[in-house]
Image: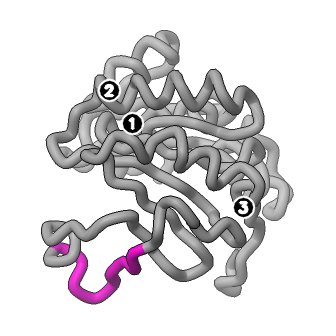
Amino acid sequence: DQNYQLMYSENVPADLVQGVIDTIKHDHEILIHMYQNDSWLMNKDDETLRDFHDEFTYVLFDEDQAPTDGIAKIFFTHPAQDHERLVVFENKLREQFGDKLNIAFSTPWCLEVMSAGVSKGHALQAVAETLGLTLENCIAFGDGMNDVEMLSMAGKGLVMGTSHEKVMKALPNNEVIGSNADDAVAHYLQDHLL
């Protein structure tokens, strides 16, 4: 909120965490990440990530006895950014957990798993309600599959020009603007709101 206080949080149900990990852990190339409270957990060491994030680093966890309390998000990456390999796991997770979890790609190489009640769309709705606004009065910008719900809920959902083709197909009637590299969001706001 305006006072930097957490407005809402909902963790992955503790009784589902190990099952999610068990579905993926047999593919030894997939990296399993979890956010637990203020900690970033990983199932194996990744020197590239460790070097890239020198001020905030991960802690290793045992994938056979994963922590289950306070897990905000579980996500999976592949070192070679193999999207199709992650799609196989997306389908397995959807089949196993159905609507108990929110499963979506944030980028083509990052598959995220959260509680069913957690999405950017739900967050937008919570912020709008706190400010006394309706979703019709909201503008949202996005480029990932985890943005689709938010973009469809907002009064004006704008799709970035560099979005994955699945986003474009899911939102065929939404306006498409330029890319982040072209400062498309800033230009849109300046042209339409300022």
**Which amino acid type is shown beneath numbered disc 1?**
Asp
Q: Residue at x 47, y 11 (%)?
A: 172
Q: Spatial distance from mark 2 to mark 1, Cα to Cα?
A: 7 Å
For label 1, count other residues whose C-alpha is less than 10 Å away and answer few (under 14), some (14-19) or many (20+).
Answer: many
For label 3, count other residues whose C-alpha is less than 10 Å away and answer few (under 14), some (14-19) or many (20+).
Answer: many
In the image, 53 versus 157, the foreground residue is 53
Stretch in magenta: 52-60
**Residue 11 falls in image quadrant:** bottom right
Task: Examine the rendered structure and indicate whether residue 131 appears above or below residue 77.
Answer: below
Can residue 179 be seen at all in this image of the molecule? yes
Residue ID for mark 1:
143
Can residue 106 be seen at all in this image of the molecule? no
Q: In the image, 76: left or right of 45?
A: right
Q: Residue at x 15, y 71 (%)?
A: 47
Could you tell me if the residues under marks 2 and 1 are in contact, i.e. CB atoms within 8 Å? Answer: yes
Task: Examine the rendered structure and indicate whether residue 104 appears above or below residue 33.
Answer: above
Residue ID for mark 2:
164
For the residues carrying marks 1 and 3, which lies nearer the camera in this image?
Answer: 3
In the image, 166 versus 36, the foreground residue is 36
Q: Which percent across, then down, holds residue 54?
A: 21, 85
Residue ID for mark 3:
11
**Which amino acid type is shown beneath numbered disc 2?**
His
For label 2, count other residues whose C-alpha is less than 10 Å away and answer few (under 14), some (14-19) or many (20+).
Answer: some
Could you tell me if the residues under marks 1 and 3 are in contact, i.e. CB atoms within 8 Å? Answer: no
